[in-house]
Image (cartoon, grey):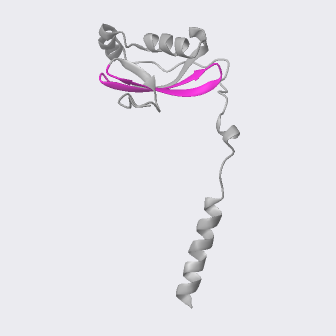
Amino acid sequence: MKKFLSALVIIVSTITFAQQTENPKQTVKECDLPSNYQEPKQDKKIQSWLKRGDATIEDLRKHIAVENDCNEKDVIFLRISEQKGNGMYSVCVEGKPMKYKRMGTVFMGAGENPFNVAK
């Protein structure tokens, strides 16, 4: 009887948690930044090293602006985590949060796979 009740509790709890899903329209959040928001500082040594391959923060800003058809001033960096070989960037583009990554000197969206060429 204990085994039956234990199994019943596990099954019922699994079913209730599995039914709790988010509305896809609610997952897109707007960037609510204060008027005095300042972008994070980038490491000057890494930026000077990345300047050789045109992979600086300003190059990424231009890339994002062209990709999203907006002005460069509409691209605001929220978080910067980078090394010489790679980097992860959280940005706010015209009020929409987005994530980008850098592999070497190539920028791409965080969800993109550069090795997936089959469509």
Image point (38%, 32%), residue name: 116
Q: Tell me the residue at 34%/17% (across/down).
A: 105
Q: Quadrant of residue 47?
A: top left
Q: Position of residue 69 (x, y in %)?
A: 59, 12
User: Could you tell me residue 115's position as x and y percent?
Assistant: 35, 30
Give the quarter of the image for residue 102. Answer: top left
Q: Position of residue 104 (x, y in %)?
A: 31, 21
The image quarter containing residue 25 is top right
Residue 45, relative to residue 29: is it above or below?
Answer: above
Q: Farthest bottom residue?
A: 1
Most foreground residue, 86 or 110: 110
| Count of numbered tags | 0
- Residue found 37% across the figure and 19% down from its top: 106
Q: Let me know if residue 96 is in the magenta part.
A: yes
Chief secondary structure of the magenta span? strand
112 part of magenta stretch: no
Q: Front-most of 31 and 15?
A: 15
Q: Is residue 39 left or right of residue 113?
A: right
Magenta range is 83-104
Residue 10 lies, in percent from the top left, at 56, 73
Question: 20 left or right of 58?
Answer: right
Q: Is residue 44 left or right of residue 4?
A: left
- Quadrant containing the N terminus is bottom right
